[in-house]
């Protein structure tokens, strides 16, 4: 019985993701944003992040692969420049297997974009 419990606990831990981030990203030009988004060293997988603007569901940013312990301190929107204002967005953390294409787990979190 203990082996079954231990296996269930191992599987549950495997699907967990440790997040380290600031929940706001700030820009002065509507294109380049200062932020802190991290792949915690306590995670087991590399990851990439995708950012969607909540209002339109448009993908506005996709990171490259972020190694364990790596982080992003700034990002640039790919095809969009936002006017001054505050925008709600959803950041999707995607952990990937060793082949770097198979998604192991995903977590969605809110990110507020502030354009000054």
Image (tube, rainbow, N blue to C red):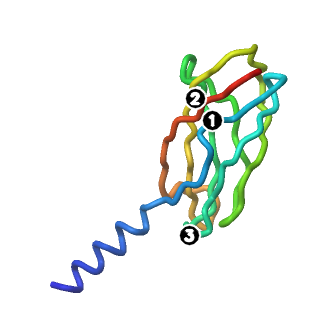
The residue shown at (49%, 41%) is 108
Residue drawn at the location 80% of the way across and 34% of the way down? 76
Q: Residue 42's mark?
A: 3
Residue 51 is tagged as: 1
Q: Quick one: label 3, few (<14), some, or many (20+) residues within 10 Å?
A: few
Comparing labels 3 and 1, the label whose residue is closer to the camera: 3
Label 1 secondary element? strand
Which residue, as the protein is rendered here, is positioned at the far right?
Answer: 29
Image x and y of residue 42, in percent: 56, 69
Q: Residue 4's image quarter?
A: bottom left
Going from the N terminus, do you reach mark 1 or mark 2 first?
A: 1
Whole-angstrom CA distance, mark 2 to mark 3, is 25 Å
Q: Is residue 92 above or below residue 113?
A: below
Inter-mark Cα distance, 1 to 2? 7 Å
Q: Position of residue 53 (x, y in %)?
A: 60, 25
Q: Are marks 1 and 2 in contact (CB under 8 Å)?
A: yes
Q: For the residues labelled 3 and 1, say whether their Cβ atoms are less than 8 Å apart.
A: no
Q: Could you tell me which secondary element the residue under label 2 belongs to?
A: strand
> Residue 41 occupies which quadrant of the picture?
bottom right
Closer to the observer: label 1 or label 2? 2
Residue 74 falls left or right of residue 1: right
Q: Which residue is mark 2?
A: 89
Q: Closer to the N terminus: mark 2 or mark 3?
A: 3
Q: How far is the residue under mark 3 from the one under mark 1?
A: 23 Å
Dot 3 or dot 1, earlier in sequence: 3
Look at 20% across and 85% down and name the residue there: 2
Quadrant containing the C terminus is top right
| Residue 59: % across, % down | 64, 29
Closest to the observer, 101 or 106? 106
How packed is label 2: few (under 14 Cα within 10 Å), some, or many (20 or more)? Answer: many
């Amino acid at each position: 019985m203990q082996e079954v419990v231990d296996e269930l606990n191992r599987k549950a831990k495997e699907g967990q993701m440790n997040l380290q981030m600031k929940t706001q990203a700030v820009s002065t030009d509507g294109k380049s944003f200062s932020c802190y988004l991290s792949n915690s060293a306590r995670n087991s997988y590399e990851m990439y992040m995708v950012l969607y603007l909540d209002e339109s569901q448009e993908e506005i940013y996709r990171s490259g692969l972020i190694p364990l312990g790596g982080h992003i301190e700034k990002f640039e929107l790919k095809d969009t420049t936002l006017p001054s204002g505050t925008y709600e967005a959803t950041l999707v953390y995607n952990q990937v297997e060793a082949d770097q294409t198979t998604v192991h787990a995903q977590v969605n979190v809110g990110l507020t974009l502030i354009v000054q």
